[in-house]
Amino acid sequence: MVSSPVAKRKPEPRAVTARERGDDGQEIAPHHLRAHTPGVPEFLDTDLRERQHPRVQANLPVQVRAPGLVRMAVAEDLSLAGLRVLGLRAPVGQALTVLLPLPEDRILTLRCSVVRQDATGVAVEYDGLDWEDLFALARYLHPRLP
C-alpha cells in the first residue's frame, strides 16, 4: 500500500491563559476540556476525574467577596485544591475571594474560581496558594484526613 504525499496541516496554536499552565510552564487541560472517562457515567466522572486531593468536612464560616458582593457563607468541606461553599450562587468561572478563618491558626485569603454549582452552593478551586497559606491549610487538613 502506497501512501499519498498529503501535506498535513499543523493545528493552529490556541491561546493559553496563565491558569492553563502548570508551575513548570507546561500546558494543562482546563476542566471543561478534559476527556470523559469511558465506562463511568458523566455525572460521576467529573468528581472521580478531578478528585486529586481528599476532602475534609469543615463547616467553617467564610466571607466571600466578588465585585459588588460581600457575603457570609459556610465552607462545607475543603481540600488542598478547593472548597465547597454552601448558600452561595455564582456562575461557573466567576472569580471570588474567600476569607477562611482556620481554627487556632490564621485567616486565609484565597483567590478562587467557581468550577461547579448546584441548588445548595458552589465548588471553587484555588487560583493559587502561597506557601504560608498552603502550610496552614495542610496543618488543618492533616489530622482530619481519613
Image: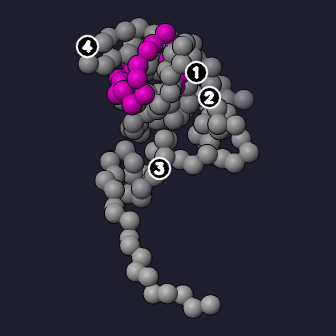
Q: Nearer the viewer, mark 3 or mark 1?
A: 3
Comes first in the chain, label 2 or label 1: 2
Q: Can residue 145 be found in the magenta stretch?
A: no
* Residue count near mark 2 (Cα–Cα under 10 Å), binned few <14, some 14–19, many ≥20: many
Q: Position of residue 40 (x, y in %)?
A: 71, 41
Q: To which residue does mark 4 refer?
A: 68
Circle 3: residue type? Ala
| SS for dot 3 | loop
Contact? badges 4 and 1 (CB < 8 Å): no
* Residue count near mark 4 (Cα–Cα under 10 Å), binned few <14, some 14–19, many ≥20: few
Q: Nearer the viewer, mark 2 or mark 3?
A: 3
Q: To which residue does mark 1 refer?
A: 77
What distance separates the C-alpha of mark 2 from that of mark 4?
A: 30 Å
Comes first in the chain, label 4 or label 1: 4
Q: What numbered label is drawn on residue 55?
A: 2
Please state, as top left, top right, bottom left or bottom right, where the C terminus lies in the image: top right
Q: Is residue 1 visible?
A: yes
Comes first in the chain, label 2 or label 4: 2
Q: To which residue does mark 3 refer?
A: 29
Comes first in the chain, label 3 or label 1: 3
